[in-house]
Amino acid sequence: MSTFTVKAEIRWSDIDPNFHVLHSKYYDYCANARLLILQQYGVSMQVIQETHIGPILFREECVFKRELKFGDEIEIKVKLLKANADFSRWSFANEIWKNGDTLAAIVTVDGLGWIPKKENWPYLLNYISKRLQQCRMQMILIHREVKFLKLDFSMN
């Protein structure tokens, strides 16, 4: 699988006075899509809460292509662009598509692994390292784009 696709819904509260989606909501849609994908592969909010960790974002940038409006059907396609072997640094591209055929925005995110919320850094480094090493990922570099073929966070 080269991308992960997550559907999102435009809510009334996402709309500005001109009846367009607020620019900040584009970031929210993509952040939610990334969390849903992590959850799908075993890194749930419960795991994040129990281990007191959270991702660090160094850069989050949106290139707006087309307006989103209330009633548009949107999908977020998430692609891994690059990552260190231990996932201590990573980059994702999040494409927001409207009505199945129009690219509305591209949100690029660069991040640093995970930061502990409590003073258990050695434990967390070990825990996250083991989880990510167990994640068997095969990547193919095609036209400067890394494609996800398989992602498995099982603890087998």
Image (cartoon, rainbow, N blue to C red):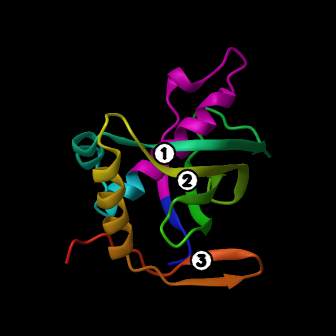
Q: Is residue 21 left or right of residue 13?
A: right
Residue 140: quadrant of the picture? bottom right
Give the residue at the far top of this rendering: 17
Dots 1, 2 in contact, CB < 8 A? yes
Three-letter amino acid code at disc 1? Ala
* Magenta residues, start to end: 6-35
Label 1 packing within 10 angstroms: few (<14), some (14-19), many (20+): some
Mark toward the start of the polypeptide (3 vs 1): 1
Dots 2, 3 in contact, CB < 8 A? no
Mark toward the start of the polypeptide (1 vs 2): 1
Q: Which residue is mark 2?
A: 75
Three-letter amino acid code at disc 3? Lys
* Residue 55 appears in the figure: yes
Q: Is residue 94 left or right of residue 121?
A: right
**Does 153 sit above or below residue 119?**
below
Q: Is residue 52 left or right of residue 26?
A: left
Q: Which residue is mark 1?
A: 8
Q: Which residue is mark 3?
A: 147
**Does 21 sit above or below residue 39?**
above
Label 3 packing within 10 angstroms: few (<14), some (14-19), many (20+): some
Mark toward the viewer: 2 or 3 = 3
Q: Rounded to the nearest whole Å, what is the CA distance between mark 2 and mark 3?
A: 18 Å
140 falls in the magenta region: no
- In percent of width and height, residue 4 lies at 50, 65
Element at badge 1? strand
In the image, 56 versus 148, the foreground residue is: 56
Label 2 packing within 10 angstroms: few (<14), some (14-19), many (20+): many
Element at badge 2? strand
Mark toward the start of the polypeptide (2 vs 3): 2
Q: Residue at image x 29%, y 59%?
A: 127
Residue 49: quadrant of the picture? top left
- In percent of width and height, residue 60 lies at 67, 42
